[in-house]
Structures are given as structure tokens and as C-alpha cells.
Amino acid sequence: MNRNFIACKAQVFNRIVTPDSFLNELIDWANQAPDEVFEKNDKKDIYSSVAPELGPWNTLLHRKAVMLEVLRVLGGFESSWDWNEGRDITNINSNTACTEEAGIFQCSGNSMNFDPSLKKLLKNVSGQTDCDTFIKVSKSNHKFAIEYCARLLRFTINHHGPVKRKEINSWLKPDAVKEFQGFLSN
């Protein structure tokens, strides 16, 4: 599908422009993703963290679009939208397969400890649950990487430094959320 992105191409920090291919993959994933990834819960999660910039939440479609905007900005911060991004060499704690960041969103295998459903997602995709597999799958399976990060952000805002420190918040754009909503409803 040919989508014309305008607001979704908004600047993120000092990064390159968000690639259309990444934006298309986000939308395609969200169109088939389970509603449970976006539904209200009782945790202090990503929706709580970005409510001042992008809330209040009107519909499930709106919540999906907000998640896509968060992932757009987070992907820029963490890797400049590089699916194959490797270990953060500035992180002294990134020294084992389970603490090594992997892929576009820089999740690490130890994040599977936040909820059993995260490990189950990796198992369903790869048949394995070890950290070396997590690294490989996070880089090679884009749908997994997107869904894993979206689910992780529903359990904690502390795994990603730019989320925890609210560094992404000033780069989140309500107009991009509206644009995502339009693409999701078509």
C-alpha cells in the first residue's frame, strides 16, 4: 500500500528522517496486532507516561496510534531506525547475552523477566527462549521486535532509558498520532 507520510516524518532528536519502510511495517503490524496489546490496564505503563503529550485516550484506535508514535520516536532514539543495531557500547552493564541490547528498539533478553507473556512470545516465534535467540530474532523478525517492544512498554517504562527519563516525550507529535489513526482506519 502506498502511504503518503507527512506528520510521521517529524524530526526525532538529531536523527535521520523516519524511513517509510519502518512506518509501513508499524502500521501493518498494528492492523493485525491483538487488541490486548493496547487495551487499558492497571499498570503505570507507556500510556501513563505519555498522557500529558498525547492523551486522553478516546478509542482503541487512538491507543493503537499512540503506541505507533511512541515506537516511531523510540526507534529513532535507540537506533536511528536500524533493525540490526547491536549492543550499546556505552552501557557497562551490557556484557552478557541477556543484558545485550538488540535491534531497532534496543530491548535486551533480560526484559523477558518483566512478564511470562514476553518469553512466551519469543517461544511462539522461534521455539526457543534463550537470550542468544532473543538477540537474533529481535534483529531479523520485525513483527516480533515491534510486538515485543509494545508489550514490554505495557509492563514497564523503566527498561528503555529514553522512556524512563522522558527524553522521547518532547518529540512525540499529536499530528503524527492523527496521521497514524487515518492509516489504521483505512
Image (cartoon, rainbow, N blue to C red):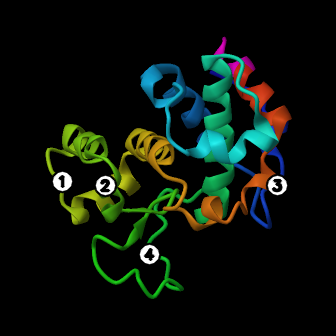
Tell me whether circle 4 and circle 2 mark residues in contact (CB < 8 Å): no
The N terminus appears in which quarter of the rendering? top right
Say which amino acid is labelled 4: Arg
Asked if 107 appears above or below 90 in the picture, the reply is above
- Residue 166 on image: x %, y %: 71, 60
Dot placed on the residue nearer the N-terminal end, 3 or 1: 1
Dot placed on the residue nearer the N-terminal end, 1 or 4: 4
SS for tag 1?
Answer: loop
Q: Kindly identify which residue carries mark 3.
A: 170
Please give the label number shown on residue 87.
Answer: 4
Q: Kindly identify which residue carries mark 2.
A: 112
Dot placed on the residue nearer the N-terminal end, 4 or 2: 4
Say which amino acid is labelled 2: Met
Dot placed on the residue nearer the N-terminal end, 2 or 1: 2
Q: Main secondary structure of the magenta part?
A: helix
Asked if 142 appears above or below 87 in the picture, the reply is above
The C terminus appears in which quarter of the rendering? top right
Nearest to the observer: residue 109 or residue 52: 52
- Residue 109 on image: x %, y %: 31, 62
| Magenta residues (range) | 182-186
Dot placed on the residue nearer the N-terminal end, 2 or 3: 2
SS for tag 3?
Answer: helix
State which mark lies toward you, 4 or 2. Answer: 2
Q: Kindly identify which residue carries mark 1.
A: 129
Left or right relative to 25: residue 11: right
Q: CA distance from mark 3 to mark 4?
A: 26 Å
